[in-house]
Image (spheres, rainbow, N blue to C red):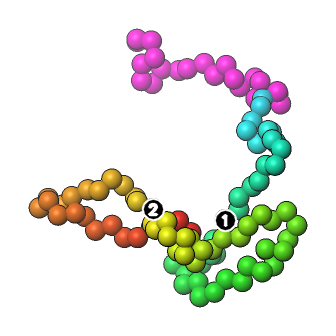
């Protein structure tokens, strides 16, 4: 079999370092002023969210900002494109449903 062929076993040289606790992970790095992002989603599939009260989250210590879908909509950024524009067999553009960021 040729070197680096499909199905060929590849030695994992990083395993001993990681399994003995000597590995370094991105989560181990904490630069100054590091902020984390958290997304809260509905626990119900296809739920219609009529209102969101963000006041409690906004006053929590360490919270820098709270954004909702309404904030994104008011920003004017629009929707996220799902793929490059594709065409149907007849040359017309395919239907792409809107995909909001939040």
Could you say which is closer to the camera, residue 83 or residue 62?
Answer: 62
Q: Height in image: 42 above or below 93?
A: below
Instruction: Between residue 90 and residue 2, name the one nearer to us.
Output: 90
Q: Is residue 101 left or right of residue 82?
A: right
Q: Which residue is mark 1?
A: 39
Bounds of the magenta span?
A: 1-22
For residue 27, say whether it is visible.
Answer: yes
Q: Quadrant of the N terminus?
A: top left
Q: Of helix, strand and loop, which mostly describes the magenta segment? A: loop
Question: Where does residue 44 sit, x and y in percent of width and height?
Answer: 59, 78
Query: What percent of the width, then of the height, locates residue 78?
Result: 46, 68
Q: Residue drawn at (17%, 64%), measured in percent from left and top?
A: 92
Where residue 13 sits: x, y (%)? 67, 19
| Residue nearest the viewer, comparing 28 with 63 | 63
Which residue, given by chain and number where applicable, does mark 2 sit on? 80
* Cα distance between the residues tagged 2 and 1: 17 Å
Q: Quadrant of residue 37?
A: bottom right
Nearer the camera: disc 2 or disc 1: 2
- Where disc 1 sits, the SS reads loop
């Amino acid at each position: 079999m040729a070197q680096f062929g499909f199905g060929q076993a590849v030695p994992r040289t990083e395993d001993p370092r990681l399994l003995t606790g000597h590995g370094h992970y991105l989560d181990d790095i904490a630069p100054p002023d590091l902020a984390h992002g958290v997304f809260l989603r509905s626990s119900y599939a296809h739920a219609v969210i009529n209102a969101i009260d963000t006041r409690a989250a906004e006053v929590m210590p360490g919270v820098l900002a709270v954004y909702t879908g309404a904030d994104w909509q008011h920003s004017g950024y629009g929707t996220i494109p799902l793929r490059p524009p594709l065409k149907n067999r007849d040359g017309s553009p395919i239907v792409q449903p809107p995909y909001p960021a939040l």
